[in-house]
Amino acid sequence: MQPVRIYTDPVCREHSAGVGHPERPERMDSVSTVLADLVGEPGITILSGRDASDEQILRVHTAGHLDAVRASAGREVTVFDADTAANRHSFAAALRAAGSACAAVDAVCAGDARRAFVATRPPGHHAERDRTMGFCFFNNVAVAAEHARHAHGLERVAIVDWDVHHGNGTMHHFAADPGVLFVSLHQYPLFPGTGRLEETGSDAGVGFSLNLPLSAGRTDNDYLYLFDSVIVPLLDRFAPQLVLVSAGYDAHERDPLGSMLLTSGAFAAMTERLVSVAERSAEGRLVAVLEGGYSLAGLESGLRETIAAMVVPEPGFPEAGAAAPAARPAPAGHGAPAGRLVDSVVEELAEQAAIQLEPVWGSLRA
């Protein structure tokens, strides 16, 4: 069994954006429930995280932004934007979330763990270079990717974002960078309004952003079809030395902020595929970082499935291009017409995505 590290910290529960806010402290209670069941399990180590350094944050954010978030420490309330507010503990929680992502990268790059999950809050993938956005203060996964490159000399890092909301901050930071492949499946239209298929990167980074905008009501089978037909072939072509996952659970069928129909098993199936990619090209190195997920039950079950897939991967990792495990039939009423496993709209999206990427990557279709 390959070793897995899980990073979490009590300070992450202390951050609050106000009564009634969906990104609430109780999310960490769901995390704690899952982790309590994992204590003593073979192959799992649960650790406290660490704070990010100014140097790590400033690789992604401006000094002015860092100073603005730091200034919220000790204040009862600081409102940054319509969706993002802080209390006296928010800066500490945000610093710990970003730093824990870096600690996880250190662990997998040093060989102390094969994979890691960063179970912290606040989330990060909406945070832009110079401002907060969408509940996010620092872009944790972007900070982790830059840390992997600067501290460990990695040249190719892949980021897969399955949160129901598009990771605008992550995409924008790496848009012109061919050293980072950004892949996102997200509901569209939905906040933040970015992530069109045509957004494939800029300058030297054209072809290194893959956005898969999905209408509401997509199922496990729809998501896994996109993984098997486009995402995994692209990742194998890129051959990442590290796979990072923006692991949001708001595409779960019970989530109040999304309108997708994923069961908890979808998160296990997506994780299995990414673990296989990491085994083929990255010596197994995979780090997942918690993003959204606002149904406490959906968050708990999705997190549990993800970690289980990291700890007990499918035996005998397939070679690049080999068929992935078959998708399970969608439950009745879960989006695909009767008799179909995958919606034709999703099949068309996969085809268009492959065509869009072909000038850079060649044919991704079998």
Image: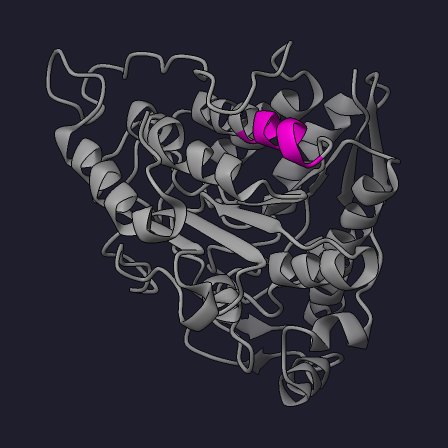
Q: Is residue 275 magenta?
A: yes
Residue depicted at x 35% and y 49%: 257
Where are the magenta residues, as a range?
A: 274-282
Is 276 covered by the magenta stretch?
yes
Q: What x and y, as percent, mark residue 164?
A: 38, 47
Q: Nearer the viewer, residue 188 or 320?
A: 320
For the N terminus, the image quarter is top right
For the point 29% across and 64% down, which residue is it? 193
Residue 12 image point, x, y percent: 71, 55
Quarter holding the C terminus is: top left
Residue 93 seen in the current view: yes
Which residue is more in the foreground, 188 or 244?
A: 244
Give the residue at x 82% y 21%: 43
**Residue 5 x, y percent position in the rendering:** 80, 35
**Above or below for 145 versus 53:** above
Is residue 342 depicted above or below 138 in this figure? above
Left or right relative to 82: residue 240: right
Task: Classify 208 as above or below 344.
Answer: below
The kind of secondary structure the magenta stretch mainly shows is helix
